[in-house]
Image (cartoon, rainbow, N blue to C red):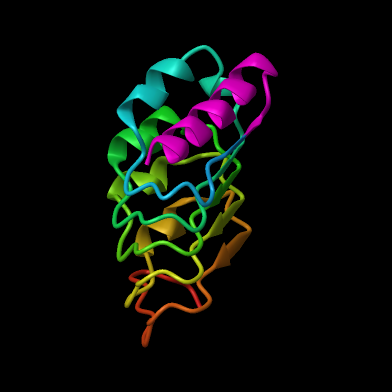
Amino acid sequence: MGEAVANVARRINATVEEEKDTLDLSKCKLINFPDAVYKVLRSVTEKIHVITLANNEFKSLTSKFITNFSQLRELNLEGNNLTKLPDVIGTMLHLTTINLAWNKFTAFPEKLTDIKTLERINLEGNEITDILLSGADC
């Protein structure tokens, strides 16, 4: 467990110190996005455009995460245990790519249709059996 925490801390520190536009916390055994990370990233939050949280153990994503990283262009949540996204996901005005492959979705996350900039959605390997989009033009 201590090694996992140290790994997360190293990756976050590298993002801050090198002023990267990418935060990669994949394969860190995370079950949620740690609150302390928001404080550490406070000075560079607006510069981060890509976040990878792939292959962790997330069951949900919080509204706080979405509002803190509303400037994201790419979000990779592949290989978690997500079944839904918070409604506030629709407010991400810059998001072009979201990877939700290999999660536990049974329905298409309809709020994604509110994101006009979204170009790519990957839902491979989920358990979606039907796509019902209210008001969608086909």
Secondary structure, magenta segment, majority class: helix
Vertical order, 14 against 57 (above or below): above
In the picture, measured across the screen, residue 15 lies left or right of residue 6, that is right
- Quadrant where the N terminus is found in the figure: top left
The residue shown at (39%, 16%) is 39
Q: Quadrant of residue 135?
A: bottom left
Tell me residue 137's x, y (percent): 48, 73
Residue 117 inside the magenta-drawn segment: no
Q: Looking at this view, is 21 or 53 the one in front?
A: 53
- Residue range corresponding to the magenta coloring: 1-22
The residue shown at (34%, 62%) is 82
Q: Residue furthest top?
A: 43
Q: Looking at this view, is 108 or 2 the one in front?
A: 2
The residue shown at (36%, 85%) is 130
Q: In which quarter of the image is residue 105?
A: bottom left
**Numbered-mark total:** 0
Q: Residue furthest bottom?
A: 129
Vertical order, 35 against 126 (above or below): above
Q: In which quarter of the image is residue 57?
A: bottom left
Tell me residue 46's x, y (percent): 55, 22
The residue shown at (54%, 49%) is 26
Vertical order, 85 against 74 (above or below): below
Vertical order, 42 against 32 (above or below): above
Tell me residue 69's x, y (percent): 46, 32
Tell me residue 129's x, y (percent): 37, 87
Residue 8 inside the magenta-drawn segment: yes
